[in-house]
Image (cartoon, grey):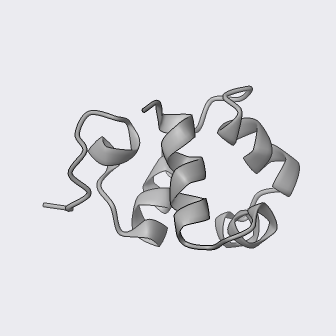
Amino acid sequence: MEYYERIKFLRQKNNMSQEDLSELLGIGQQTLSQYEKNKRKLPIDLLISYSKIFNVSIDYIMGITDNTEIK
């Protein structure tokens, strides 16, 4: 699974709307939609925020591992 698919999966798994998550991230809903569709590259600061919000490792988000555990 690619990172843009994982960020959408995490949002949906946690029953969050794009609007809810974009508010937590401090970005616009349209910008979030572009990240989830791979029309815009996810900056490192948002990658870190995703990791904290969903309590998963950056390696999981990036598709390096299927293990969500943060070490």
Residue at 48%, 70% (x, y): give it. 53
Depth check, front residue: 13 or 51: 13
Residue at 25%, 44% (x, y): give it. 66
Q: Position of residue 17 (x, y in %)?
A: 74, 67
Depth check, front residue: 31 or 38: 38
The answer to whether residue 7 shows anywhere in this view is yes
Q: Residue furthest left?
A: 71
The answer to whether residue 46 shows anywhere in this view is no
Q: Answer left or right for 6 relative to 36.
A: left
Would you place residue 62 above or below residue 55 in this image?
above
Q: Answer left or right for 5 relative to 16.
A: left
Residue at 29%, 55% (x, y): give it. 57
- Answer with the quarter of the image where residue 11 lies: bottom right
Q: Position of residue 8 (x, y in %)?
A: 60, 50
Q: Quadrant of the C terminus?
A: bottom left
- Answer with the quarter of the image where residue 15 lies: bottom right
Q: Quadrant of the N terminus?
A: top left
Q: Answer left or right for 50 relative to 17.
A: left
Would you place residue 11 above or below residue 37 in this image?
below
Q: Answer left or right for 15 relative to 23.
A: left
Residue at 50%, 60% (x, y): give it. 49
Q: Position of residue 65 (x, y in %)?
A: 22, 39
Depth check, front residue: 4 or 28: 4
Number of callouts:
0
